[in-house]
Amino acid sequence: MYVAAKGGEKAIAGAHRLLAEERRGDPAVSEIGTDQISEQLGRAVDRVMTEGALFDRKLAALAIKQAAGDLIEAIFLIRAYRTTLPRFGYSEPLKVSDMRARRRISATFKDVPGGQVLGPTFDYTHRLLDFALEAEGGARDHSVELHSAATGDALHDDPGPMDPMPRVLDQLASEGMIEDSEAPAGDVVSPVGDITREPTEFPADRDVRLQTLARGDEGFLLAMGYSTQRGYGRTHPFAGEIRMGEVTVEFMPEELGFPIEIGEITITECEMVNQFKGTATEKPKFTRGYGLGFGHVERKAISMALVDRSLRCRDLGEEAGAPAQDEEFVLSHSDNVQATGFVEHLKLPHYVDFQSELELVRRMRAEFDAAQEAKEEIAKPEAAE
Amino acid sequence: MTAVQSETPRAEADSGYNFAYLDEQTKRMIRRAILKAVAIPGYQVPFASREMPMPYGWGTGGVQVTAAVIGSDDVLKVIDQGSDDTTNAVSIRSFFVRTTGVETTEKTRDATLIQTRHRVPETPLSEDQILVYQVPIPEPLRFLEPRETETRRMHALEDYGLMHVKLYEDIAHHGHIATTYAYPVKVAGRYVMDPSPTPKFDNPKMNHSPALQLFGAGREKRIYAIPPHTEVVSLDFEDHPFEVQQWDNACALCGATDSFLDEVIMDDAGKRMFVCSDSDYCEERRAAGHVGEEGVPL
Amino acid sequence: MKTVFSESPLLQAEGIEKRFGRVHACNDVSLDLYPGEVLGIVGESGSGKTTLLNILSGRIEPEAGVVEYAVREGGMRDVHQMGAAERRMLMRTDWAFVHQNPRDGLRMNVSAGGNVGERLMAVGARHYGQIRDTAVDWLQKVEMEAGRIDDLPRTFSGGMQQRLQIARNLVTRPRLAFMDEPTGGLDVSVQARLLDLLRGLVGDLGLAAIVVTHDLAVARHLSHRLAVMRRGEVVETGLTDQVLDDPQHPYTQLLVSSILKA
């Protein structure tokens, strides 16, 4: 007698044991520590914090370890954990102008007050595999570099007081060359939305769009932003300013009535300057696109700023038709936790649905054959004549 | 000057890689594309662009063209935004020093091969020089028609009405042509070409230039060329002729009034000054005794 | 009939065949069009009339048959044997194509003036002022406000967009216009005004036209002659009044009576 496959529970337990084994790899190789991930795979940690929407390096490192380096899986773990956290309230808006910037560049002006600070960047490295890194302890000794910094070679490694770094776009704003970043005083400002508390409705406002983009998949936003550069909804972007560094987080407990500093986080911010040709009633001026993420996530911040600007086509009265200008399309498909869940759910059993389809296709094939036969029957006597 | 045969790496070049990084077969493939490009001025020749050790959009096309034409006796100059000391120029120059060991210079006059992003040097070029442009988007019709199949057909049929529609729209909305860089040109009376995102200020320098001008777009896999002494006309209307940018200021350092000026923000209060974008030109003028308002005699 | 128009045809189609899978879209279709003549092609949707229009205008290849056009330089040229460059030149000078949906025939991100001026610029007009004057002139000819010359097409109503498409097509004074349901999708009152305008323009310009429509009222209003199509075949041809008032073929009779009842 035939017995259908049972014992799912046992199979699952076995699969998880295999996964744990695979994650650990060869036991002869020493186990990776979450501190090592946090310190030496920092960009992976930053991406997981940004798209996981939770600033916690330790937890992000743990998630990466647990996910065996699968970053979307790690983001998923962080999002799921985030759900369990009690919420105390909203922080005060970050004062990004007061950032202790470790990197700050502007592509629009050769020099700007506060200077161009390259900081830690892959830019201008030649992408040649450095085989010295392969050998254990073969990497250049970091303390040597600190030493040379102390001799004054690398000015911006100096932790002493920094030159003030006014925002580049404020310079354009002071001339009225660029749109305001804030609503004019006296305007009724609707409260900022919260996509973790309210479902997104279309058309969405910019606050909701930016929140969605901030959590959005880096690869998706990269492709969307790239498409605008290649002519599918061109926005004439210039990287007005990109800055990365530490900012203070302030929180106002209701019982105190004034904000207190609760800590410091690392963020990357991109302010894009885009052309806008004006209308019959409005002077030509530059417009803005904005990107922000936790840690050092420059690619993400730039992509986000491009897509933010594209999605503003409706507000700016631009002809829309490109994929990156389609708010519903972009916002509905940017979240990789949602996307991976649904794409991968195709692995789940669909026996029942498929059985129904199977039956239908069999029936239709039979009907088709019957119809063909009937036609041939009718055609026969004619052919004989 | 430019050797197109295989080169033996010099002692100072990194011996782990072939001369100029690319293998000889790849260089030959690129040279064939360059020859075709020279034979059909302004026509975009597809080529099998390689992955290079710098990111797409950062000059991979220009780097591949330079790698294909550079010889051990070349003198290389690399500029970005007109200047030799901008980060990307420094990076690309050091790449070629490392992989070829050739002599480099910051002086336009001394260079046999100049790779540039966004500028044509102010100092006139000569017949002994090659100017290699880095090109992000080679297709001048791209922002009017995103599809490659259609733009190639438009080039083939010389169907360029749309290009003038763009200029018409500029005048209708702004009273003048509002394209300031990547200003489209017609080469040798046939192909409409994107001069790369150089300011339109530089377009006249491309016309009948004695130097060979090569354009490389790595990500988009295209090479095109303007052979020496070729007509390059900026598109315009009879009653709205092409004009180049002009400044109310002279260079604050060298006092030049005929060069492209960069705006530099000096302080938080919005104080700014204008200086030559071409750092070699500025330097040369200052060495010759010219002093601008904010400059000091050298 | 032929005495009304010039002796030699402007466009001549012979034995046109086209199938899509098992559907016979055009079955041995032949027709002539004389300079200044308007030919209506009527039939239900799926009768093959739009396919025929696309074959006549060189937009799709027939499987068999020949379409010839009398070029300005003289002589009949096989439309499907021409080079792509020559056919494109014809499309932007001597021919017009009016789509049912104006979005298909307009550049939606280009102003009204730019839309009208494009053909002029494509054939070498390089004087901004003159291009603009011509555009203003044509906007007025299609009864649009000259003051809206710099507005984008999407700011216009459907009827206005259709007028703009017509102006954009006629600015090079073509000799032949292909029209695919030119008033389809418009309100009845808007349709009527557009039909009057079209009839006036065709008369003033001496334009020949092939108008595909399922609407017999449109056909009656615009065309001198009618061809009735059914399942890829032309079942009846003749002067418009003759075909509509005294239909010979049973299908035409059905078509005319169903319209009258409705």
Image (cartoon, rainbow, N blue to C red):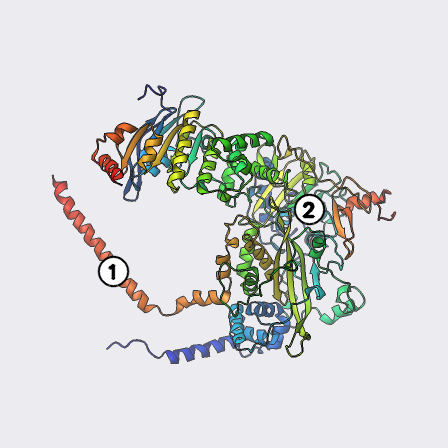
Q: Going by the image, does C257 lie left or right of A150?
A: left
User: Which residue is located at x 30 percent, y 42 percent?
Assistant: C46
Depth check, front residue: A323 or B170: B170
Residue drawn at x 58%, y 70% as measured from the top left? A49
Tell me: residue A43, above or below residue C98.
Answer: below
Residue to which mark 1 is pinned: A362
Of the 4 image quadrants, the one containing the C terminus of chain A is top left
Q: Chain of mark 1?
A: A
- Separation of marks 1 and 2 at Cα, in angstroms: 66 Å
Query: SS class of the residue under badge 2?
Result: strand
Return the mark for residue B116.
2
Q: B73 or B227, which lies in front?
A: B227
Name the spot of residue B114 as percent of width and height, x first.
70, 45
How packed mark 2 is, by other alpha carbons closer than 10 Å (few <14, some 14-19, many 20 or more), is many
Compared to C234, does A176 lie above or below? below
Residue C180 at x, y percent in the picture: 38, 37
Tell me the kind of residue under disc 2. Answer: Thr
| Residue B64 position within the rendered picture, expressed as x and y whole percent measured from the top left | 62, 48
| Local crowd size for mark 1, using a 10 Å CA cut-off: few (<14), some (14–19), many (≥20) | few
> C251 and C148: which one is in front?
C148
